[in-house]
Amino acid sequence: MKKHIRIASLLMLGSLAFQSCTKDFVEKNTNPNAVAAAAPQSLLAPALVSLLSTNLSRNLRINNELMQVTVTVNDNLEIQRYEIRPSESESSWSGWYVQLTNIRDMYQKALAGQQKGYQTYQGISLILDAWVSSLITDMYGDVPYFDSNKGFSENNLTPKFDKQEDIYKDIFRKLEEANGLLKEKVAVESANTAMDPIYNSDPEKWRKFGNSLYLRLLLRVAHKTETNATVKIKEILETNAAEYPIMQSNAETAALYYTNVQPYMNPNFTMRDFDFNRSKGYAEFLINNLMDLGDPRLKIWATEATLGVYGGMQSGYKRGNVPEIQSTLQLALKSEARMGNIMNYAELQFIIAECGIRGYANVDASAANLKGVNAAMEFWGTIAPETYLTNPKVAFSSTDPETEKLKKVHLQKYFAMMFTDFQQWYEYRRTQLLDLYKGPGLLNNGKMPIRLNYPIIVQSLNRENYQEAVSRMGGDGINEKMWWQPTIN
């Protein structure tokens, strides 16, 4: 029992080295010998499968409730009322930090190895490190980063919490390094290519994803003038674009497309139907906007409330006044291949559109917006009707003020990021450009939470470093501002 408690504690601290969580996956999907099991390519797919399972689970439970995608019928679950229990923090923290250990182990093994293509695995590892680290710091603020994931390698079980500003600087450094490594286009051993379920070990596609992710994160901090993020955005999109290739189509979208054959199973595949789509319904905000636009994705995502009619539930309802479920998640989503999205091409186009609107780069914002709309539709296997593309609620008008254009972009971006970890929430926190409804039962003074608190076990087992971080951030509540977080009204 003591051993199990110790292992669990290490997981929560984000300090555990490569564990048995990937053992079965590796045994079933690699050459069963010690050398292959220790190779960097053997760590890639298990980490991705685990991370995306964590992300989708927490997306459905937390992100979608905050962002008025869904509304629970559990009257005691307050997330849709802007009240989040401390226990909600632990699943994401442990899920992300365990796999961050494996990702960093991948880099070290590739660095030390001599096999063909190991330089490419270094680049892939750096991109995944940047992705996961950004998820962690954007969720909690100051977190263990430079000293994290060294529980066994350096016997550091109480890593210090680093400032979010410093974490972002190093994330950008890693993405620069990855771009340089993958620029060489070093092919991996042909026998290993299929061990990458995202890009089949194609270094150029990984490079394009890395630079697209770079733009996502640069835009997130572009309002912080000390970062010079706008200078780098202009370089990537305009002055030095050849050095920073980005995704060019849906074919280059960063996603694990579930086959529902082990090990690539949609995490909801075996969930009971009731747990998947009868414990919650879609929210009014999502359904009303899709209906208002005549969006063809409505029937892909949602069931009819009654014959031929869709409807949404009130988000932020008063306790004791649980509304009746209307439209629910289509059961087909339980086996949907596209639920393993990391970053799609449509999101990138909406990033480019915003950069153009704000003057960060000389790009055609209107064209990028429409490219994003078309790509987002295509991603879900449908086509945007011509009337949709010309709808004044979608297309830009020459008389639109900047804020109106940005609102159009961010509503479409909201759709494009459906079922994608916490990106809808992170983006709303940055911009507040979605006109979310204000329910009558909202708690937290009606303010959208900014972050999740640190996990309780971290507070107790790494208390000194925890207290230093909390003192720096001004507290450990859901409303404490983090470095890049703009003021919430």
Image (tube, grey):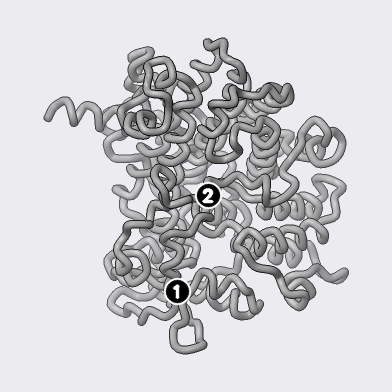
Residue 61 spot, x, y in % from top left: 38, 57
Quarter of the figure with the N terminus: top left
Look at 44% across and 78% down and name the residue there: 327
Q: Residue furthest bottom?
A: 307
Q: Nearer the viewer, residue 82 or 177?
A: 177
Say whether residue 322 is visible: yes
Residue 363 spot, x, y in % from top left: 85, 50
Q: Which mark is residue 475?
A: none
Residue 63 spot, x, y in % from top left: 46, 57
Look at 77% across and 75% down and name the residue there: 386
Q: Which mark is residue 439?
A: 1
Residue type marked 1: Gly
Q: Which mark is residue 257?
A: 2
Quarter of the figure with the C terminus: bottom right
Look at the picture and state if 146 lies above or below 357: above
Residue type marked 2: Tyr
**Would you identify the image quadrant in which residue 412 lies?**
bottom right
Q: Nearer the viewer, residue 72 or 98?
A: 98
Q: Residues within 10 Å of mark 2 (few under 14, many from 20)?
A: some
Q: Residues within 10 Å of mark 1 (few under 14, many from 20)?
A: some
Q: Nearer the viewer, residue 413 or 398?
A: 413
